[in-house]
Amino acid sequence: MIDINKIREDFPILSETVYGKPLVYFDNAATTQKPRQVVEKIVEGYYKRNANIHRGVHFLSQEATEAHEQARQEVRAFINAKSSNEIIFTRGTTEAINLVASSFGELLSDGDEVIVTQMEHHSNIVPWQLLQRRKDIKLKVIPFDENGVLKIQELDTLITPKTKLIACTHVSNALGTINPVKEIIEKAHAQGIPVLVDGAQSIPHFKVDVQELDADFLAFSAHKIYGPTGMGVLYGKEAWLDKLPPYQGGGEMIDKVTFEKTTFNVLPFKFEAGTPDFIGSTALAEALRYVNAIGIDTIAAHEQELVAYAVQQLSRFDNIRFIGQTKERSGLVSFLIGTIHPYDLGSVLDKLGIAVRTGHHCAQPVMDAFGIDGTVRASFGIYNTKEEIDILVAGVERAKKMFKQ
Amino acid sequence: MTINEKQDEIIAEFEFLDDWLDKYQQIIDKGMSSAGIDPKYKTPENLIEGCQSKVWVMAEYKEGKVYYQGESNTDIAGGIAAMLVEIFSGHTPQEIIDTDLYFIDRIGLKEHLSPTRSNGMLAMIKQMRLFAIAFKAENENK
């Protein structure tokens, strides 16, 4: 049984008030709050282990290097990668995807095709469009139906001999839909096509095992799983990472540099140019330890209960429209009330101390598909409670009257 | 009434509303009861597209004075738009250009002018001033 009150005590920000009201934080899909343990790890890092890592002969540098590489091991274990060589530290999901688009993109030829889904975050659309400026590649899209469920059968016709990569989100940040990535990967692998999974919205909410999925690449952000901002991970199968050219050039990623020729470092360092965020990596590892101590399955069950409760309670409004109605839903509820604009509803909820996100959630093609400007999104984390959902429902009720709906 | 008298009148209206939601209610009601913009002016040229919401604004110049129409697809931004239209309409370009727009801050709605809100409000105010500047230039060149 999960002791929410005890968990909440770990997150000082949750006892803050906004406009004199207790904070109800339902914007976890954007970023999660940080437990004391993670913040203390950052402080401890700067106070006790601050020295540039790798190649340092002095004590502090050794300590910092060890902590950083230990963090890599913990990330490896968390997603069950085979080797820590497959764990590349990045600034976040966005940089991880850009890395693949840039480096994998080097292997593509004019006429090649990349498939994404209609429910991608802009960060899994725009990097491919940038690549299109350099190479004449085609971007194809797996559409979704009126419930926000991928029309996976269309993949059979979308895949051609020219398809070189499928890049798809595990969980939609706008709809909450959990996509059948395992099935997508099986279909892709049957044709010899690798798959990049955007795990930004799945990693914090349920167990993701890269070997079980057989994913070729997987990207996620630390700050969405109670870790620090500016830190992320790209998992890549070693065979693939070996094949890809480096992303950025600089220190760390080199083997030998002369003005005539430079050779590159081995994995994972080949993709980590410059001084890595060795404080952020240890803080991420601390966040993963925090999640492990509660248990990712326990977290998943708790959040499923919150989502089900939110859907049930919000359903009392006869003019509610849920955007995305799938059985396989994770972590969030996206909705509209009558003709109230999301901006208006979000502004009123804000004054009641409730933090929700409004707008297109960086997934404009999703909004276009539903013919709407945006939604109100309540997204949950381990510290949220049913009582907070009751506050949200009461807030919506209040707003409904204010906007005469 | 001068522009500042109009601003002060709005501030007085809000002064007795302690609760945030009462303030919002007042703004929402203003938006809902405003004449908005004549549908024929609801064109792409008059549209200011914020990330969160849309605002339409247009202006006419009659006998030395500027008359605005404005509307938003959200009620809160629409209410603010209605107040801006009310405050600026019927004044000379110079009066509009010289205005220190203080009422939004004073009624506690400053955050709706924050660029991070991206609701088009800042752009609307800028556009309203640009109309005034353009009319002034046009007038001086006659």
Image (cartoon, coloured by chain):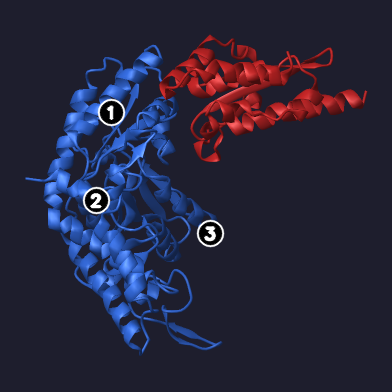
Chain colours: A blue, B red
Tags 3 and 2 touching, CB below 8 Å: no
* Three-letter amino acid code at the position of disc 1: Leu
Identify residue for label 3: A134
Q: Residue at x 35, y 35 (%)?
A: A356
Asked if residue A334 is positioned above or below residue A139 in the image, the reply reads above
Q: Chain of mark 2?
A: A
Asked if residue A99 is positioned above or below residue B53 in the image, the reply reads below
Q: Chain of mark 3?
A: A
Q: Residue at x 45, y 22 (%)?
A: B18
Q: Residue furthest right?
A: B142
Which quadrant of the rendered structure holds the N terminus of chain A? Answer: top left
Asked if residue B81 shows in the view, the reply is: yes
Q: Residues within 10 Å of mark 3 (few under 14, many from 20)?
A: few
Side (left or right) of A308 relative to A98: left
Q: Residues within 10 Å of mark 2 (few under 14, many from 20)?
A: many
Q: Which SS class for mark 2?
A: loop
Asked if residue A291 is positioned above or below residue B87 in the image, the reply reads below
In the rendered image, residue A47, in percent from the top left (x then y), is placed at: 35, 72
Q: Are marks 3 and 1 on the same chain?
A: yes
Q: Chain of mark 1?
A: A
What is the quadrant of residue A279 in the picture?
A: bottom left
* Three-letter amino acid code at the position of disc 2: Pro
Identify residue for label 1: A392
Q: Residues within 10 Å of mark 1 (few under 14, many from 20)?
A: many
* Three-letter amino acid code at the position of disc 3: Arg
What is the quadrant of residue A59 in the picture?
A: bottom left
Q: CA distance from mark 3 to mark 1?
A: 47 Å
Identify residue for label 2: A204
Dot in front, 2 or 1: 1
In the rendered image, residue A32, in percent from the top left (x then y), is placed at: 31, 48
